[in-house]
Image (spheres, rainbow, N blue to C red):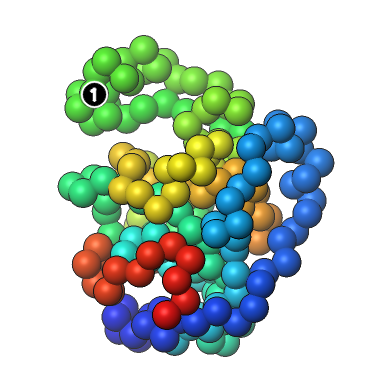
């Protein structure tokens, strides 16, 4: 499968009915409502293997393949230019309300923002990794320090905003976490591979 063939024919196949188990998490329940335009949908896709994750930064979308030619599409925020890293990775760890420690590169780039957290920040509603995190490792086993994670800031979805990770609103991060097994293959597609598509467009 050529990467450009994946998602090229994505069209909406009907509204996705979310897993409501996360509604019992009091911390998430207190968060502002998620805009309807960000609602996950089942979409038709071209290509992809079952139970893979594809992040397409040009669409600000994460696609979890669920059956032949179908995927759940979640909208995401992605890494800023120069920090986004494409490639193939595997999920080797999953954590609920994870703690967070900025990388040394992050501290060097923005010491005023990150130096104070060099010893780590405990998990919780204000943690940058949000309610759930999936940890991406290289095929040969090393930690990429890239994550698929939650956020309580819906305004950052659909933007090049992070230090390289892909973020979902917490509501959707919990659902993705529940649906994703250890060892799942994750493909982060390069920027500029597809025509830009605004959030909410199924064209």
- The quarter of the rendered structure image containing the N terminus is bottom left
Residue 83: name its quadrant: top left
Instruction: Kindly identify the residue that appears in the image at 71 percent across and 61 percent down.
Output: 18
Residue named by callout 1: 110
Image quarter of residue 17: bottom right
Above or below, 97 relative to 134: above
Across and down, in percent, residue 173 comes to: 59, 49
User: Helix, strand, or loop for circle 1?
Assistant: loop
Compare residues 138 and 13 and report the one nearer the observer: 13
Is 86 placed left or right of 198 in the picture?
left
Q: Is residue 23 above or below residue 97?
A: below
Number of numbered callouts drawn: 1
The residue shown at (67%, 69%) is 16
In the image, taking residue 151 as reference, residue 59 lies left or right, namely left
Residue 106: tell me if it is visible: yes
Report whether residue 180 is seen. no
Identified at 64% across, 37% down, the residue is 32
The answer to whether residue 104 is above or below residue 14 is above
Residue 11: where, in percent of width, then height? 50, 82
Query: Where is residue 71 drawn, in percent x and y?
Result: 56, 75
Q: Residue at x 35, y 49 (%)?
A: 159
The one of 84 and 57 positioned closer to us in this rendering: 57
Task: Give the left or right position of residue 49, taking residue 56 as reference.
Answer: right
Residue 151, image x, y percentages = 52, 39
**Dot 1, crowdedness within 10 Å: few (<14), some or many (≥20)?**
few
Determine the residue located farthest toward the top in the rendered image: 116
Residue 16, compared with residue 163, is above or below; it is below
Q: Is residue 195 toward the left or the right of residue 154 in the image?
A: left
Q: Quadrant of the C terminus?
A: bottom left
């Amino acid at each position: 499968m050529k990467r450009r063939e994946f998602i090229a024919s994505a069209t909406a196949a009907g509204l996705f009915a979310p897993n409501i188990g996360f509604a019992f998490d009091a911390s998430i329940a207190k968060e502002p409502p998620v805009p309807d335009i960000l609602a996950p949908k089942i979409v038709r896709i071209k290509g992809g293997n079952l139970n893979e994750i594809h992040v397409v930064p040009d669409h600000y979308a994460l696609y979890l393949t669920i059956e032949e030619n179908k995927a759940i599409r979640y909208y995401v925020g992605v890494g800023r230019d120069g920090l986004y890293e494409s490639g193939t990775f595997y999920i080797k760890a999953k954590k609920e309300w994870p703690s967070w420690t900025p990388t040394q590169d992050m501290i060097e780039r923005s010491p005023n923002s990150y130096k104070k957290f060099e010893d780590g920040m405990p998990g919780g509603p204000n943690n940058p990794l949000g309610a759930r995190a999936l940890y991406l490792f290289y095929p040969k086993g090393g930690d990429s320090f890239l994550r698929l994670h939650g956020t309580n800031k819906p305004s950052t979805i659909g933007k090049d905003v992070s230090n390289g990770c892909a973020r979902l609103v917490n509501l959707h991060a919990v659902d993705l976490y529940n649906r994703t097994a250890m060892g799942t293959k994750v493909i982060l597609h390069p920027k500029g591979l597809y025509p830009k598509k605004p959030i909410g467009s199924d064209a």
